Amino acid sequence: MTAARHTVLMGADIPPASHVPLRHAPPAVSTVKELYATALVCGIPDCEEPLYRDNPATGQRLLNSRIAHIHARSEGGPRWDSGMSKEDNRHFDNLILLCERHASEIDATPDDYPADLLRAWKKKQIEARSHAAGLSLSDTEAGQVADASFSVDALMERMSAVVPFTPRLRSRQEALELASRSCRARSLVRLRSTPADRVHAVLAWKAEHAGPVVAVPEGALRVLVAPMGAGKSEEAERWWSQGLTQAWADTETDIPLWLEAREITSTLAQAVQDALGNDPVRACRVVVDNLDAVSPRQADQLLRDARQLVLVWPRVSVLATTRPGAGSVEERERLPVLPWPSRRGMDLLRAVLGEDHLRIPDRHETRQLLTSPLQVHALAGRLRAGGDTHVSARELLSQLAADILQREHPQTSRDVWDALPRLAARILDRQGPVQAGSFAPQHLLWELEETGLVVHDSNLLRFALPLFEQHFAAQALREGHTPLASAAAPQSFPHWRYAIAFVVAAAPDEDAEAFMRTLTRTNPAAASWVLDEIATPSGDKALPPAAAAGEASADSGGPEQVPAVARHLREATLHWLAGLEPLGPLLARHERGQLIPWAVQLGHNWLTVAQARPGVLDEDLVAWADLASLPNPLTRFHHRTSFPTPLGRLACWERARSPLRAALANRMRHRTLPVAPTSPLAAERAWFLARTIMAKGHLSKVGQHIPLADLRPELDILMDRVANAVRASWQWSSGHKIDSDDVRWLTEHVSHVQGDALTSPRPPGDRMRPPPRFMWQTYSPELTRSITADVLRDALIGYHDLVQLNFPRFGAALGLYSIFPVRVEGVVAMPPDESQSEPATVMYALRPDAQSAQDQPIVDVRLSDEPDYPAGSFWTSLRRDHDRSSAFRLPGITHQEAPLPYHERQATNLAYRWLSQDLHAVGWLERPVNFP
């Protein structure tokens, strides 16, 4: 039996009674002299400094603690004297205290230290103690000896080296300061991607714009549940900081605890006790962050621990954070973290970048990037990396998705990576979450959840961030899970659009050309939008190999050959026209149902194209050597134009679209797209043309009706002029102009009119006496409201007619059309003072409504008593969150003058305005067309 470390009991070696703890203490001392004498006994001269304090009571307590600790650390058993009783052998008088060095030597070589030697050492210790106790030292002298022998700091340092650390060793002030530093450190770590010179501004912004702190009652568990990056930890931090503020002010409040779920290795109760250094008997806030970082089983166990903890210690409150599906959270415990309003995200983005004026593409998807702190900070990092904020939405979405995936770096199986594109395709096709049970077996669902990229909640699967949908949907297109034509179909395209753009942008040139052919045939709106989204900057273009070869042959002086770039251009034009049917023949000249032949000339990076008159060319495409300098080209060609050779990737598709867009814009400005004879837009056009023809500059001569018997002779005269002219037009003093197309259209329309007269679409004024000062005063408020409702109803019907007849393949890519059927909610505010010239104002909003009929939509327009704004409750109703189902529409409240009969073609103007905004959104108009 070896000597115990620090302790050796004199006596013969016998087996130790290890189950009997050695917890005897030195005799009690009451004076400094006795304490000094005891210290001498506890530390022989050639050992380390003895345990000692200058205060008798404290010294006694430290000595007792030291002895107990020495016994507790004993590695061997006591040495027993076989001639002593058990009690005597365990008595303090039979104990010798040694330093680490001597005790280690005895442990290592016990045979070199027989019992007699140890008794001799004990005897010397007793004699030294007796001698010291008999010394006539004053308390002052004893203090001087103590100061010369050891200090309190030295004693604490030696004790801390052997006594296990506990938070109770810190003072409350130290613990509060440490908690404050930890809070700031966590905040700074969350802003690690923010430039150092902007961190202070961002922290100030967050403090200024912080909303209400979540409420967690004492004795309760609450769980913040939201997808990655929603700001759960920040919300928990604010609640924790509130508790820290209370702890600074109230000593009866425990300092709050912040625990990471993955760092809790025992029970939650044990982790709390270890962190506090005692039981949580006082008010104490506990945050358990990132439950989703541990396995579902561990998360459930921690939640059970938390529920038990708050029951055992009713002044404790626990707030946990997790992603949906991680941990079984009861409904009463759940605290959802709602997405940010995009305006708040934009404010944070400005604070991070330090720029007040940002140009971010205003798209449905880019607005979603502003709805969570994670995406806002990632967006800020991307914009800083790019050097400016002039970046396309496609670039933002694709690069942010890759950046976030790189940061998360989920480790998972090949099956999971294969399932993610299929899940994205299913979500976009369904336009919402998918049933988990129908998508994958349970084990794969668990793996999908563990990636953090997928949320499994209420048996539904969705991605944690919407931008992941487009990222993985692009993979679904590349891998063939979804055909491109299916994704570009009218109802699918708005949801698949960025996935399609990702694929086309990343494809090799030949594949990109094939993709464009598919897109133009399937949905010209999709093709046009993708073309704009992936457009190559003008300074980045290069001459395609085929075009370069064509130009070389054109300049070589050999026989004329059609340049390859010209063939490519005509092919692209034909694909656009095929997709635009039945509108195509109205946008480009046709002959016998075919696009008229072209003559082309290529030289010095310029391409000249002329549209031949009938009989001039025998083939669809002919090279013409001197086409650009040909005198009097109109004798052979309808039109001739020269432009820089379409260079670079997909440049011919852009050039082919350009003249078609110009022709469409012209049709839009003149409001001459075809509609059915029964359309309200046809009725407005017919009345406008007939009134202009009959009035001949004097509109007041025409009343509310125009007899057809009077109108037809006038039309016959105009038709004779039309038949004998290439193109004719008329304009009277009223300022209105009509042309050959108008006369032909009205003649055809009149043949379908039922009855013997054309009637004005709007009623006359009802307040003619006394004579009004302004025209709007001839209409009472109620009649103004009624006319406004009729105009809005006719405009909706007319818009629907325009799309159905002219853009059947565009479908849901047209924003307003995508939310049909709709209803109108609006108010008419009359002028407060009848002496002013401004008429009434109408404010309206368009809302999806399945109950609203296509041919008779619901229109709810009311009068407002307030001159500037509608009544409070109705205004609040109008300003509620807008419908988000349309990717291409920016819904909102529209303000405009109330339409009145003396405003021409009001419903037509409104319908064309809506349509022009939708066409502009998909790239088929360079800018929206507005009408006065």
Image (cartoon, rainbow, N blue to C red):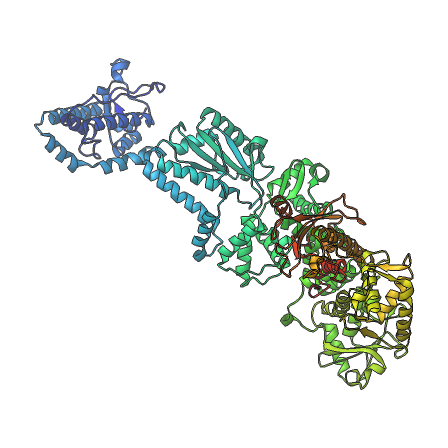
Q: Quadrant of the N terminus?
A: top left
Q: Is residue 770 left or right of residue 118?
A: right
Of the pair 426 and 892, the residue shown nearer to us: 892
* Residue at x 31%, y 19% (from the top left corner): 14
Give the residue at the far front of this rendering: 770
* Residue 291 rendering spot, x and y as whole percentages: 53, 37
Q: Quadrant of the C terminus?
A: bottom right
Vertical placement of 175 versus 830: above or below?
A: above
The total of numbered circles placed on residues is: 0
* Residue 442 rendering spot, x and y as whole percentages: 67, 35
Q: Is residue 690 left or right of residue 864?
A: right
Residue 330 appears in view: no
* Residue 879 rendering spot, x and y as whole percentages: 62, 48
* Residue 505 rendering spot, x and y as whole percentages: 68, 61
Give the residue at the far left of this rendering: 136
Of the pair 261 and 468, the residue shown nearer to us: 468
Residue 332: image quadrant is: top right
Of the pair 609 and 557, the residue shown nearer to us: 609
Q: Is residue 780 left or right of residue 715?
A: left
Residue 527: image quadrant is: bottom right
* Residue at x 88%, y 74% (from the top left corner): 722
Of the pair 18 and 899, the residue shown nearer to us: 899
Residue 173 appears in view: yes
Vertical placement of 673 versus 275: above or below?
A: below
Residue 617: image quadrant is: bottom right
